[in-house]
Image: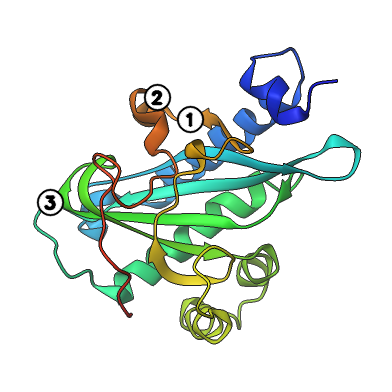
Amino acid sequence: MMSLIERLLGGGDDDAEARIEDARKSADDHLDARVDADAYGIEDAAVTGVAVVNEGPDDEPVTVPIARFSLGEDVEDPDYDLVWDLVGEALRALVPAFEGLFVRHYDVQFTFDGDGLFEAEECRRVAVPPEMADRFVSDPGFGAGTLREAMFDGHDIDDEIAPVAWGECKDYSQNSGMAVVATSAAGASAASCAGAGAGATGCGGAGAGGL
């Protein structure tokens, strides 16, 4: 019997892919409504994909929703206060949309020092565990500053496991046990970059820096 990921990769008739894509589209619509790129001084924002990284109980897909912000072609050193404000906007869009799905963590990615969501030289991510994300959207006393502190307190030397406060982007499409099964129109021509990792074309990045 094929695994869920194999079925999704093979374009089977399982309704899991449809549910994931519906959640991605809903989150993308909410992010578009929340984030005015001009007001924030950024180039673009989108929920660019959803990675399926494992199978949970009853073959439930374990997902990583991916939101991405392009900070600008001329940005070499990001404004980290802006970064964390945008992390907050991403979570407010993602968490309600993915309420009915199994989420391992939320990937909020930032491209800069290059053009657009997929052609920048640098890509960094903030990987937020669902318990922190849920608290952020439900507890008015747990704002962006508190989330930032909690993320740094929880981030150890492992940049693979959330919480990751500021690490290199991860390319989920390059792992044979994972699948990027829902991508936005912006990301359709660059699906391998939907969860981009350092060194990939248009998804570069040197070592992680501090915030």
Q: Residue at x 39, y 69 (%)?
A: 85
Q: Give residue 73's mark.
A: 3
Mark 3 or 2, nearer chain start:
3
Residue lying at 56% horizontally and 83% vertically, measured from the top left: 150
Q: Are marks 2 and 1 in contact (CB under 8 Å)?
A: yes
Residue 28 at what x, y percent from top left? 48, 39
Where the N terminus falls, by quadrant? top right
Instruction: Tell me the crowding category of disc 3: few under 14, some 14 to 19, or many 20 or more residues within 10 angstroms, Cα based.
Output: some
Residue 188 marker: 2
201 and 123: which is toward the camera: 201
Q: Among all residues in the image, which is located at the extreme right?
A: 58
Q: Which quarter shows the C terminus?
A: bottom left
Mark 2: few, some, or many residues within 10 Å (few <14, many ≥20)?
Answer: some
Q: Does dot 2 land on a helix, a strand or a loop?
A: helix
Q: Secondary structure beneath disc 1?
A: strand
The foreground one among 192 and 80 is 192
**Inter-mark Cα distance, 3 to 1:** 23 Å
Up the image or down, 178 lies above or below 5; here it is: below
User: In the rendered image, which residue does mark 1 sit on?
Assistant: 183
- Residue type pointed to by label 1: Thr
Q: Position of residue 17 (x, y in %)?
A: 67, 25
On the image, the x and y values in percent for residue 163 come to 57, 71
Q: How many residues crowd mark 1 within 10 Å: few (<14), some (14–19), many (20+)?
A: many
Q: Are marks 3 and 1 in contact (CB under 8 Å)?
A: no
The kind of secondary structure element at disc 3 is loop
Q: Is residue 187 visible?
A: yes
132 and 207: which one is in front? 207
Question: Is residue 57 left or right of 154 when viewed as pictured?
Answer: right
Q: Amino acid at mark 3?
A: Glu
Quarter-wise, where is residue 202 in the image?
A: top left
- Residue at coordinates 46% horizontally, 59% vertically from top-left? 89
